[in-house]
Image (tube, rainbow, N blue to C red):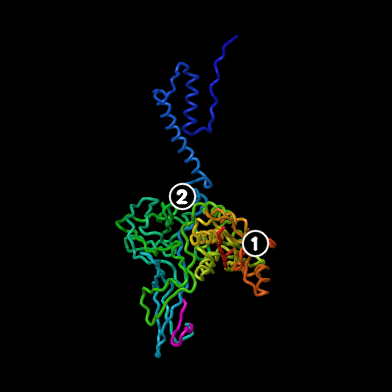
């Protein structure tokens, strides 16, 4: 009978870690080198096997990393996501500035009084910070007659008020970016970040003085202010802006095929811009109270409503979601879904929905960037309407509306372990409820379930049990128990003794969920919390 050689061990190509590689090599060694029997860690062959397994583990790890960076859904490096999305012409939204409406209060003299608010007037938020956000007025210089109907009557006689739109920004003087070498595809990095692209002015000294160049979306074609498609030729003084993974902006020039090459020179490329943007400027109401620019007769300045619209650069996760949506829309706002995709790309929008109730009207419901619900600032509303002007269908009217808040009222009794302190535990429970209804955790039409709240609170150390006896919308009638108790002049549920409350609760059931309309956002309106030692 013929003796056959043993079959080599099967190769499992999914084994890519150190232990699997080491085991596979030792199995192969037993087959090829049966005389090698010493597999102790001190053996030289085992040492070499460990070194090869370690090297293979590292190599295979980087191979998998490189493979995962080839697709937007699996890429981990932001640089890879940016490069992949640029293949379909999508550039993630850079940081955007917050906007606010200031209420300026002036004293009205007896004689003529004309106040001039210059363009670039600055105001600062009063915050405990070394670098409080600065807000600027970006419109043309305003001449305000305090005796005319330009102003509003003040709360006190002899005062007048004026509403001034401002944006989170700071103007910078012209900055030299470098020298052109006359080569194609030159790149210059802006030294300050984040720049506001709408304010960016790039100039090149072509020998006879500084000449302003035009910013385009790309070097193939772009859309002009009048909605026409503009081609970038070898004679076009065009440039594009690209942000890297660190939000640093670079200016790219053409190659004499698509876009002109700046002529060779020394320090002949400069830029002027305003910097600003980010969520830190979404300050609360009555926070912007300091005027840097001196204005005559100015008594006080404040922002009655919170600043909104400030956003950080579009995250990789959101860019991967929005990029294909914008690509499918063809950058045209035809359907409501197109309007939603383009609204996210316009920037300053945290949540958006769209509806079409008439054949020639689309309503875009917007919740601006920020940490809580707030109305859409007029500056952001104007910016969105301007953004959609060349994208909407001819004859279609687009309206930007505020998202409606859905106030939620919650009342509960929590029994806790006596070994825990009541005040810190109360704060933890309140924080858990706030996280459950946080602005970034809710969405339009999102139904709320008390079971989710039970899971959050019961996970807090020290909580033994809880009873939720109110879980409904605050704009709807309260629970029947509270109504009945109030009708007979009895204490409310929160003030009743424990045994009476338990007896009443055993006869009623909390609503299984809170329904929210398709264009509403849940907002915590009322929280009643009582603690009892279990």
Q: Position of residue 82 (x, y in %)?
A: 47, 50
Stretch in magenta: 152-163
**Observer-nearest residue: 219 or 416?**
416
In the picture as drawn, the residue positioned furthest to the top comes out as 1
Are there few (<14), some (14-19), or many (20+) residues within 10 Å of tag 2?
Answer: some
Question: What is the quadrant of the N terminus in the image?
Answer: top right
Please state if 135 lies on the left or on the right of 330 as rendered: left
**Observer-nearest residue: 85 or 230?**
85
Q: Residue at x 49, y 38 (%)?
A: 64
The kind of secondary structure element at disc 2 is helix
Total numbered labels placed on residues in the image: 2
Q: Position of residue 247 (x, y in %)?
A: 42, 55
Q: Which mark is residue 381?
A: none
**Observer-nearest residue: 11 or 457?**
457
Q: Position of residue 496 (x, y in %)?
A: 61, 67
As for residue 153 lying within the magenta part, the answer is yes
Q: Is residue 310 visible?
A: yes
Question: What is the quadrant of the C terminus in the image?
Answer: bottom right
Please state if 236 lies on the left or on the right of 360 as rendered: left
Q: Where does label 1 land, which residue?
A: 502
Q: Is residue 396 visible?
A: no
Please state if 322 lies on the left or on the right of 290 as rendered: right
Q: Where does label 2 land, which residue?
A: 78
The kind of secondary structure element at disc 1 is helix
Please state if 431 lies on the left or on the right of 466 as rendered: left
As for residue 290 lying within the magenta part, the answer is no
| Residues at marks 1 and 2, CA–CA distance in whole angstroms | 54 Å
Q: Residue at x 44, y 30 (%)?
A: 53
């Amino acid at each position: 009978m013929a003796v056959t050689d043993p079959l080599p061990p099967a190769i499992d190509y999914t084994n890519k870690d150190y232990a699997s590689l080491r085991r596979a090599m030792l199995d192969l060694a037993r087959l090829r080198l049966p005389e090698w029997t010493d597999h102790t860690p001190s053996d030289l062959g085992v040492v070499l096997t460990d070194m090869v397994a370690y090297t293979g583990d590292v190599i295979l790890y980087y191979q998998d990393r490189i493979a995962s960076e080839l697709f937007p859904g699996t890429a981990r490096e932001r640089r890879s996501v940016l490069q992949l999305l640029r293949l379909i012409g999508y550039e993630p939204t850079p940081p955007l500035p917050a906007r606010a409406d200031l209420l300026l209060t002036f004293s009205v003299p007896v004689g003529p009084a004309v106040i001039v608010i210059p363009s670039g007037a600055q105001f600062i938020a009063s915050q405990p910070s070394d670098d409080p956000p600065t807000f600027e007025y970006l419109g043309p210089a305003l001449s305000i007659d305090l005796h005319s109907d330009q102003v509003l009557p003040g709360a006190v006689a002899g005062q007048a008020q004026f509403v001034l739109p401002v944006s989170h920004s700071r103007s910078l003087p012209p900055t030299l970016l470098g020298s052109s070498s006359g080569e194609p595809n030159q790149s210059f990095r802006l030294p300050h970040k984040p720049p506001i692209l709408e304010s960016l002015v790039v100039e090149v000294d072509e020998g006879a003085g500084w000449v302003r160049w035009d910013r385009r979306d790309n070097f193939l074609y772009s859309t002009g202010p009048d909605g026409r498609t503009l081609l970038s030729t070898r004679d076009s003084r065009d440039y594009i802006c690209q942000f890297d993974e660190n939000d640093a902006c670079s200016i790219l020039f053409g190659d004499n095929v698509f876009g002109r090459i700046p002529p060779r020179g020394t320090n002949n490329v400069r830029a002027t811009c305003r910097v600003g943007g980010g969520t830190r400027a979404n300050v609360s109401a009555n926070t912007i109270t300091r005027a840097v620019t001196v204005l005559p007769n100015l008594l006080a300045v404040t922002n009655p409503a919170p600043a909104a619209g400030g956003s950080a650069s579009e995250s990789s996760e959101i860019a991967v979601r929005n990029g294909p949506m914008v690509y499918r829309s063809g950058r045209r706002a035809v359907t409501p879904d197109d309007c939603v995709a383009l609204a996210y790309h316009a920037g300053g929008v945290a949540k958006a929905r769209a509806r079409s109730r008439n054949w020639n009207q689309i309503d875009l419901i917007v919740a601006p960037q920020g940490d809580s619900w707030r109305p859409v600032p007029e500056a952001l509303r104007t910016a969105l309407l301007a953004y959609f002007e060349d994208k909407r269908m001819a004859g279609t009217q687009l309206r930007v509306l505020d998202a409606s808040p859905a106030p939620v009222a919650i009342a509960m009794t929590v029994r806790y372990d006596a070994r825990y302190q009541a005040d810190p535990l109360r704060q933890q429970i309140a924080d858990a409820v706030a996280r459950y209804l946080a602005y970034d955790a809710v969405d339009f039409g999102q139904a709320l379930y008390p079971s989710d709240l039970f899971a959050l609170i019961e996970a807090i150390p020290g909580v033994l049990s809880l009873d939720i006896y109110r879980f409904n919308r605050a704009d709807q009638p309260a629970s029947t128990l509270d109504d009945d108790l109030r009708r007979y002049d009895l204490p409310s549920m929160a003030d009743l003794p424990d045994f009476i409350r338990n007896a009443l609760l055993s006869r009623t059931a909390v609503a299984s969920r809170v329904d929210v309309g398709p264009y509403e956002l849940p907002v915590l309106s009322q929280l009643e919390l009582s603690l009892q030692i279990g």
